[in-house]
Amino acid sequence: MASIRERLAELRERVLAGDAAGVERQHALGKRTARERLDMLLDEDSFIEIDLYRQHQARGMKISENRPHSDGVVAGSGTIHGRRVFVYSQDFSVFGGSLGAAHASKIHKVMDLAIATGCPIIGLNDSGGARIQEGVMALDAYGGIFRRNVAASGIVPQISVVIGPCAGGAAYSPALTDFTFMVRDTAKMYLTGPDVVEAVSGERVTHEELGGAEVHGSLSGVATFVHDDEESCLEDVRFLVSLLPGNNMDGPPEGEPVGATSDVRPRLAEIVPPEPNKPYDMRAVVAELVDDEEFLEVHENWARNIVCGLARIDGQVVGVVGNQPMAFAGVLDSAAAQKAARFVRFCDAFGIPLVTLVDVPGFLPGSEQEHGGAIRHGAKLLYAYCEATVPRIQVIIRKAYGGAYIVMDSRSIGTDLSLAWPTNEIAVMGAEGAVNVLFRRELAAAADPVALRAELIAEYTEQLMHPRYAAERGLVDDVIDPVETRAAVARGLRMMATKRRTAPARKHGNVPL
Ligand code: HXC
């Protein structure tokens, strides 16, 4: 009779034999296997697997003849840079990675453990969606994931990596998580595939055109990060995790101070052109402000008129939001407001201080924006800032006009520290427009309207637009030399490190979705 250890060895052998066939099939598709991906993602030898022996219990439709172990998903926990995470990795070589009751219950289990232990959840998605042979049980199982995604939201960071198909309702899990990575060529996300699209509307579209990484990285905003290959993608997931807290009670991982509080950056005085309408790359300003120029930008190619991302300043993890004068002159529009609002809410939920770099001429005018609900979308960003209780620092780099000034973390909506460069223009509107509104009659009657206009513009600029006007009224706390911005922000972060705020209890606010 076989000993207990022999029986265990025999069981493992059977499971791994199944895996070997799967490896070949997956490699033939030019993809890594579920286990190879976890090897790349996690610290060496850190993976603790659960439910290796799990099999589906479905019957009929020929599925009862085939019950592969692990049921198409590898699940468990490991560490990234020594910090614990919970993971699942779908195995396309088993029923196309499709999700049935057993497969899903493994995912439910790791999600429950992640929430209970306060650790991030990372899901590697490579799946044909709901397992057709399991009928409504598969749909029920998806619902269990969505419910847990929502329960975990704001409690533990959630990261989705899409490295294969992620179709139908399956796409809603990444959409409910905090960050979605996609890999070019292999990743596809859509609610209905090209065949259904053609049948319903006659539109012919390829998988890539409909829901490839490029589309979601630049047009829809569904993908937060887009990568060329699985290796660089998983490497960036590791980097992202290194910047995130395990949960909403921990605060982000602290790094060693690097002397930023006395740092002088001469380049900061050169990046921003003195001409008010000349563009520059806000990311060049960010690079000077953050440690080692390391900036993990979210949605790099979507809503490029606003820049959002995570970095460290003097070792402290911060979320940076900045208008981008290089794209549409840095105006706020619907997409930019949605992108920044979601980012601000993420940072606030996980105790990450916010640094907002302002150079904004206003909102993008036009019927397309208005009819598309620009008011609703802009309100999301306003709401997100008003609600944020993390330390908040506003740096007005150049322009801050009208409602856009208010939205970009102004004093009135609760910034803790407002710093302004001396070159900037803070006002209800630009000088030309203001003079036209205020002095239309005088200009019409003037003997020399050109000279009068120039005189009035100079007067308005001097009196109302200089940051001195805002500083004298307490809306700006300090007017700083640009080269000292990194030091001033680092000191501000230290000053507010212990910030606390309690608001009256409520079930939740009604964020304008
Ligand atoms: C069961 C599935 C499956 C599924 C794929 N397979 N999807 N088995 N349920 N949903 C199986 C295939 O039969 C095949 O088995 C193997 O996986 C590989 O699939 P292929 O089609 O050969 O691969 P490929 O050509 O790469 O195409 C991948 C694919 C395609 C684009 C994902 O398989 C596909 O369109 N699948 C169906 C997608 C779908 O409509 N899913 C339901 C979505 S609705 P063999 O034995 O031949 O290797 C949904 C609802 C969720 O998910 C709702 C939640 C609320």
Image (cartoon, rainbow, N blue to C red):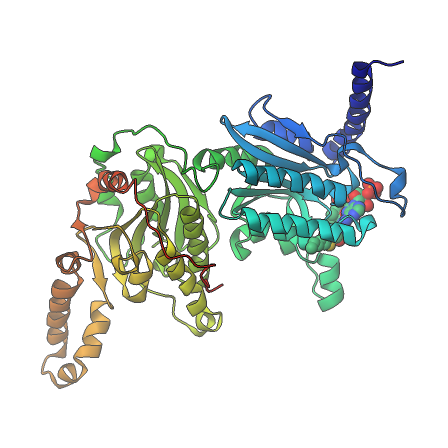
- Which quarter of the figure has residue 447? bottom left
Q: Position of residue 226 (x, y in %)?
A: 54, 44
Q: Position of residue 248 (x, y in %)?
A: 45, 42
113 and 366: which is toward the camera: 113
Q: Position of residue 195 (x, y in %)?
A: 75, 58
Residue at image point 22% right, 61% down: 426
Residue at image point 37% right, 32% down: 254
- Name the quadrant of the N terminus: top right
486 and 433: which is toward the camera: 486
Q: Residue 212, can we see it?
A: no
Task: Count the numbered circles shown.
Answer: 0
Task: Reply above or below: 231 against 339.
Answer: above
5 and 77: which is toward the camera: 5
Residue at image point 44% right, 72% down: 370
- Which quarter of the figure has residue 292? top left
Q: Residue 164, can we see it?
A: yes
Tell me if 156 is positioned left or right of 36 in this view. Answer: left
Tell me if 366 is positioned left or right of 448 in this view. Answer: right
Residue at image point 67% right, 57% down: 191
Tell me if 72 is positioned left or right of 478 in this view. Answer: right
- Which quarter of the figure has residue 255? top left
Q: Position of residue 405 (x, y in %)?
A: 29, 61
